[in-house]
Image: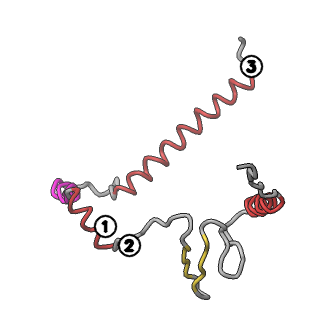
Amino acid sequence: MAKSLRSRWKRKCRAIKRERYAVKELTRLKKMLGLKEEDKVTENEVMESDQVIFLDANQINKKKKEAEPEEDVEMSSDEENVEITDTKGARVFNSKTLKDQNGQYPVWLHKRKIAKLSNNKKKLKRKPKRKRYINKRK
């Protein structure tokens, strides 16, 4: 496939940009590292900056545990009530119906999910209970 004038021109412009940005990037990197072109860095300064403190995984985990105290979380069964504390007060949600003590759904529950739950509840109410067949002959 032939190379068009436009693609050649764009390639040329990109090459010019690369050269210009390379100089800027190099100065920025040197500035980040703290190296300046005017000041020559001595070996002592380099050795001081290369000193690294090594930590074991155990030490890191200990620091994390100290920072965040663990909370005991118990799994709730389907029939248990879940308590959620708000700034206003404690709300108790039934995990089966997902409603609180006032009959309200939680804020984070999506409208489609609420509609689905209410439709299922209506279907169960409409469905007649099966009558048992009693054998009168004995």
Pick whichever, 12 or 65, lies toward us. Answer: 65
Q: Residues within 10 Å of mark 1 (few under 14, many from 20)?
A: few
What stretch of residues is rendered in magenta? 43-54
**Inter-mark Cα distance, 2 to 3:** 66 Å
Q: Count residues near mark 2 (Cα–Cα under 10 Å), then give few for <14, some for 14-19, many for 20+.
A: few
Q: Is residue 64 above or below residue 57?
A: below
Residue 127 placement, left or right of 85: right
Is tag 1's residue or tag 2's residue first in the polypeptide sequence?
A: 1
* Relative height, residue 4 to residue 87 (above, below): above
Question: Quick check: is 49 in the magenta stretch?
Answer: yes
Residue 111 relative to residue 54: left or right: right
Q: Tell me if residue 4 comes above or below residue 106 in the rendering.
A: above
Viewer-side label of 2, 3: 2
Q: Residue 4: give its label.
A: 3
Label for residue 71? 2
Going 38% across and 72% down the picture, which residue do you hit? 71
Residue 68 lies, in percent from the top left, at 35, 72
Q: Secondary structure at mark 2?
A: loop
Amino acid type of the residue that numbered disc 1 sits on in the rendered structure: Lys
Q: Residues within 10 Å of mark 3 (few under 14, many from 20)?
A: few
Q: How many marks?
A: 3
Return the residue found at the far right. Answer: 126
Residue 99 in percent (x, y) is at 67, 73
- Residue kind at label 3, given as amino acid type: Ser
The numbered mark, 2 or 3, whose residue comes first in the sequence reads: 3
